[in-house]
Image (cartoon, rainbow, N blue to C red):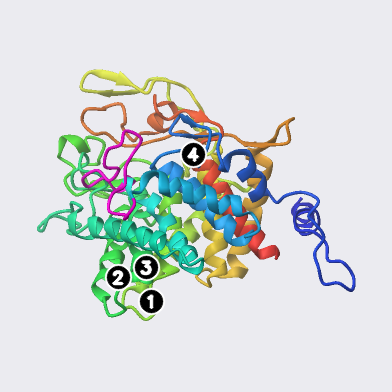
Amino acid sequence: MKKLIVGALMTGLFGLTSCGTGQKKEAAQPSYAQQMIASHGLGDFYCNRSYHDSLRTVMWDYVSGLVANAVLQAWTLYPQHEEYYQAVKAFADNSTNADGTQITNAKGQNALRPSNIDDLPAGNVYFALYEEEMKRGHEQDAQRYKNAATMIRQKLKYDHQRIAAGLPGEGGFFHKAIYPNQMWLDGLFMGSPIYARWQHYFGDEADNESWSDIAHQFKTIHRYTYDADKQLNYHAWSATPEDENSFWARREEPHKGCSQEFWGRGMGWYFAALVDVLEYMPRTHADFPAVHDILRQVAAGLKRWQDADSGVWYQLLQYDATRCADGVGDTIGGQTYNVGTQPNYLEASCSGIFTYAYLKGIRLGLLDETEYLPVAEKAYNGLLQQFIRPREDGKIDIIQTCASAGLGPAKDPSRTGTANYYLAGKDVTVVENEGKAVGTFIMASVEWERRQQ
């Protein structure tokens, strides 16, 4: 199967060279990245079950930002598609005021809520927009994007709540203000890459402290969530497991403060964050080896848990499809939640982002190609076979995606972090064309297609 797919990419998707001219003929069929962008990336996708029909008009959100950033990555590979760039620029302009000092949401309110790390990653689009607008001589727009990116970085570095001195994990960013003293794997993707990009693009080269701060986030969460026996990281950790908002956390060692399961997309966010940060982190920095070692541990663990038959990964990484919700549910405060018998399933968004991180890590020389390219190739072929479905109108869909998942807070006791929750929870439904799968598939495809050129 691998040879068939690679052959299609090399001929049908990227075109043939005309003899004697050195020019490429027009491709017979768009690449998978281009197909997904035409089908859903420029519109017609969901953000946490909320439907949107155009990237150009959707407002600020980490899911729409993920799709926008994926489309922008595709534009760097296919710059002839100016519509990709313009759609992402329109997305940014929709939410950013004229001088870049305010970012607004769909309600016209400040999109950057106090200490909410999920509000930040859409800003990753600003850096490529800044560079391109400078090249095009549009200095006012470029400055606008720089100002907005700087505002996000300052808000994270100086205003975002952190685990207090005297507690385990001192200095770690809260995932959100409503989750006090909690760090989630998701949060490393939401905050650290934009912090690292800002340091690379606009920071002082002598500012070692900020790079140490970025590294500290990874070193902290890895210290507390990594299970060396399973070679996986628990979804989240609380420095104060006795807090009512951390009712899901373990109260005893080992892994005190950790949630109970290894959630696929949470690990995906974490894996991608490591690669995205190490892309920019100075290799001479004292903390680079430690963060790089964490990346290698994560890559090795995910290789171990890759499904041997399909090449992709399950929603709950340590189980296969024989693991089901137990039909009894979880009882919290006398109420029962998450009752069902749904089986564990192969999940699209985590499989897409794992594939992206492997391929990008290999490209950057951060992961050994001999060891991990076979993993990535099997994974990419698995994405196509397991999750991509052609439609009669010529578009493609991506299926089998976890809509959302979280832990608590106290006002939402159904989000228990158990296997029952991740398989049968009220918000953990299985959907198609969700932006978190659309975006990660485009990102994986861009990395795959980059190798073919």
Q: Residue furthest left?
A: 166
Residue closer to the observer: 18 or 344: 18
| Chain part drawn in magenta | 98-118
Assign a secondary structure to mark 4.
loop
Residues at marks 1 and 3 touching, judged by CB atoms closer than 8 Å: no
* Cα distance between the residues tagged 2 and 1: 8 Å
> Residue beneath label 2, please?
211
Q: Residue at x 48, y 44 (%)?
A: 317
Q: Which mark is residue 291?
A: 3
Q: Label 2 sits on what residue type?
A: Trp
Residue, disc 1 = 282
Q: Name the front one of labels 4 and 2.
A: 2
| Whole-percent x, y for residue 104 in the image | 32, 42
Name the chief secondary structure element in magenta. loop
Amino acid at the residue labelled 4 = Gln
Magenta-drawn stretch contains 273: no
Which quadrant is home to the C terminus? Answer: bottom right
216 sits left or right of 50 in the view: left
Nearer the camera: disc 1 or disc 3:
1
Which type of secondary structure does the marked residue at label 3 adopt? Answer: helix
- Mark 4–mark 2 distance (CA, rounded to whole Å): 32 Å
Q: Residues within 10 Å of mark 4 (few under 14, many from 20)?
A: many
Q: Secondary structure at mark 1?
A: loop
Q: Secondary structure at mark 2?
A: helix
Q: Badge 3: how crowded within 10 Å, few (<14), some, or many (20+)?
A: many
315 and 451: which is toward the camera: 451
